[in-house]
Each structure stands twice: as structure tokens, then as C-alpha cells.
Image (spheres, rainbow, N blue to C red):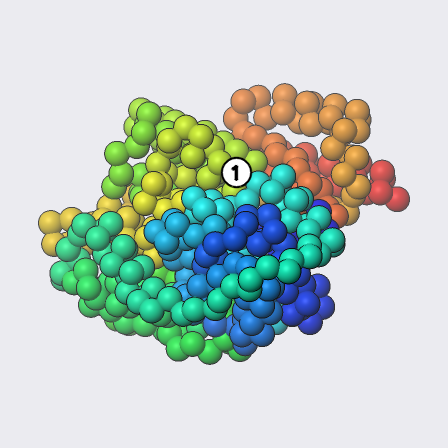
Amino acid sequence: MKYFGTDGIRGKYGEKLDAELAYKTGKALCQYFGSGDYVVGRDTRVSGIPLEKALTAGITEMGGNAVLLGILPTPAVAHLTIQTKARCGVMISASHNPPEYNGIKVFDCNGVKLTSEQENSIEYYIDNPPLYDGEKGKTVNFIGARKKYIDFLTTTADADFSGLKVWLDCAYGASATVAKQVFETLGAEVMVDNCSLRGEKINSGCGALHPDYVARSMEGTDYRLGFAFDGDADRLAVVYDGEVVDGDTVLYNISKSITLKDNVVVGTVLNNLALERKLKQDGKKLLRTPVGDKHICDLMYRNGYNLGGEQSGHYIVYPAATTGDGILSAIFLTKALFRDGRLHDIEKLNLVPQKAIAEYAEPSIMYDKWIRSLLEESQQKLDGNGRIIMRMSGTEPKVRVMVESEDMSLVDAILAEFKKYINSVAN
């Protein structure tokens, strides 16, 4: 697609994404979804202000009403879209990306990310701006949006964290508006890092992509549990007893605080084999989707499964949330660990080593008969004791090959063969 990528429209502000594109997107959304209310939120990025102004101008020019939430996490936008019965919800954020980037994420009236078909239709209207000569819409501020989201989180938690100490890294992002208050309302004693709304520093050496920051902050203290969010708080990283906890272990421990529908956890092809094995031991199963929380959510919604996640830190607890919610995920993990007034040890997984390469290649390589043959031969070499995942990158023209096995010499040999062949084709 021309504008939409793996998670909405995204790019450096002033280059791929600017006020003109935001304005056209606002018009296109209103043409596609029709007249009514459009919930709009943003993170702390400086460019969020002109993008919000342009987007809402496009919406109101087409007769829609722009309902501004201000600075709130992405999952708050999804939640409030449902609660207000809006036509759709829009979040202006580039999530975990650096400050110079920004993006536009769109949710339908059910708080669900758009399908590829919907994105294609909206792209058509972006390139072919619709005409409208009817009554213009209004721009209004949603008074109390922050409180409504905080109330939702604390009510959903149904927990008492009195006696718990927790350290939060808000990455100078949207979670700074709610995370501390949520945990304090639940009774926890909270310390925070990077909790000011300084969009020029969002995600810079801190937050979910840099959990070592909060780990260092906790050194020499009696705080054992730490959470780091990314810029729009749809992603979570966890620190426990000074160590960064891998995403599969986080997902497994969250699963212990939830009654799973059909004993199913939904993940992607990249979730570690150790998670699948551990769930099987517990009488549960892992269902895998292609990479991306959008695919996880789709499988969950279609079947009513209530927990899914991926290694990168996106966890979905459905139906409480319809998209990844870092703060809500932190709450459910805390519920699994903090019992009887004390913090219990996190249950660790014996992770199977994973190693990957990413090489420049055309998408057609996925159908190359020789590489398909190499894939089959390599699977046979693993003899059921590992996995190989080959896929095209969703963000750049590269083919990614991941091999998972306890036999690292075999992993290296397999990856070397793939690299040699892919480069021979590319050259």
C-alpha cells in the first residue's frame, strides 16, 4: 500500500507524513465511515499538535465531529471509541519510534484496527479527495477522557496492590498521563522515571525499547518489579529482580491470572518454542498467527479467545481491551505475581535459542523453488527439535529467516546456507 504500513500511516514528520497528508486522511476517513463523531488522541510528540489540527480540519470539513481526547495512550483511544459510539478512533503516534517520527493509527467503531481492505479504500479517498458541500462538523474537547480511562483500568483490575512497590518508566510518552495514578489508586507505592510530557525526548534511551534504563534505576533499592512503556503505551517491557524479562515469559505469567477460553493463548510464528511447550504441559495450547498484533487480534475476535501477545511486548487481554494495552497488561501480570499481600517469583521459561538474518531480496524469493527446497531440507535437519520461519519484512525490502534450536552449530550452518543462496539470487 502507498500510505498504510504494518501499523497505520507512519514516517518522519515533514517527509512521508505531514500536515497535508493528515488533512487528506481526515477527509478520507469521514468519506469512508460517514458523518458522526471521530475520537482523536495523540502522544506527546511535538509534531502531534499540527497533525491533530490538520486531521481534524479534514474531518470537520466533511461534516464529521472531531472529539479531542488530548494526550492519552493508544488503547484509551480504542476504548473510548467504543464507549462513545464514535464512527472511528484515530491515534496520532509513532508508538516506539524516535521523536522525529509520527503516525496515524485508525480503529473502527469496535475499537479494532482496520483490515487491509479498509485501508485500501481509505487510500483511494486520500488520493482522490472527496467533494462535500454540506454542513461542516465541530471540534470539541472530551472533558474527562483521562478519568474515564483511569476508571476503566482500575475497575477492570479488581485488585488490591497495597504493600506492592512498583517502578514505572513512561518514556516521556502518553502513559505519563495515567500510569502512576492507576497503580496508586490500586494501592501500590510507585516510583516513576521519564514521566513528564516532553515529546522531544519520547522513547529516547528509555521506555519499552530500553528496559535496561528502569533496571538501572531500580539498582540498590528494594523495588523488585518494574514496568516500561513505549510512547503510546501499547507496548510493555518488564523488569523483575533487576533482570529484563523476555516477552514469552511475560505472556506465560499473564496467562496464569486469566481463565483462558478453550485453554488457548494466541501468539505469532515468532513466539518461542518454550512457551508452546510450557503451555502444553499445563494442558493449554498456543495458536500461532503471522507476525503482528493485528493478526493476533483478528484470530482472538473471530474465536472469542481472551489472551494473546508477541515477544515485542504487545499483549491483548480481550474483551477488556481490543488492542495492545501496556498498562492493562502490567496490571494482569501484577495480579499473577502479587498474591496474599506479597510478590511471588516470576515463573521463567527455558527459552530455546533463536537466531535470525535479514537479507535484501524481492518478495518473489518466497516462491523460489530452490529456497523452498532448502527450507524443507533444513526442517528435516532439525528433526522436529526446532523451527525455521521465513518471511518478508513488513517495513523494508528484506527476507527474514529465523532458526530456533538448542543446537547452535546447526542453527549457524542453516542460516549460512540461506544467506549464501539469498545473496546469490539478489546479485
The residue shown at (48%, 63%) is 66
Amino acid type of the residue tagged 1 in the rendering: His
Q: Quadrant of the C terminus?
A: top right
> In this image, 229 relative to 407: left or right?
left
Q: Nearer the viewer, residue 388 or 89?
A: 89
Quadrant in the picture for residue 149? bottom left
Crowding near the residue tagged with mark 1, few <14, some 14–19, many ≥20 C-alpha atoms within 10 Å: some
Disc 1: which residue: 295
Q: Position of residue 89 (x, y in %)?
A: 47, 54
Q: Position of residue 46 (x, y in %)?
A: 54, 76
Q: Position of residue 43 (x, y in %)?
A: 47, 67
The residue shown at (23%, 56%) is 154
The residue shown at (17%, 57%) is 161
Q: Nearer the viewer, residue 337 or 117?
A: 117
> In this image, 253 relative to 3: left or right?
left
Q: Is residue 5 visible?
A: no
Q: Is residue 123 visible?
A: yes
Residue pushed farthest right? Answer: 427
Placement of 18 over or under 197, stated as above or below: above
Q: Position of residue 143 (x, y in %)?
A: 33, 69
- Helix, strand or loop under label 1: helix
Placement of 288 over or under 150, stated as above or below: above
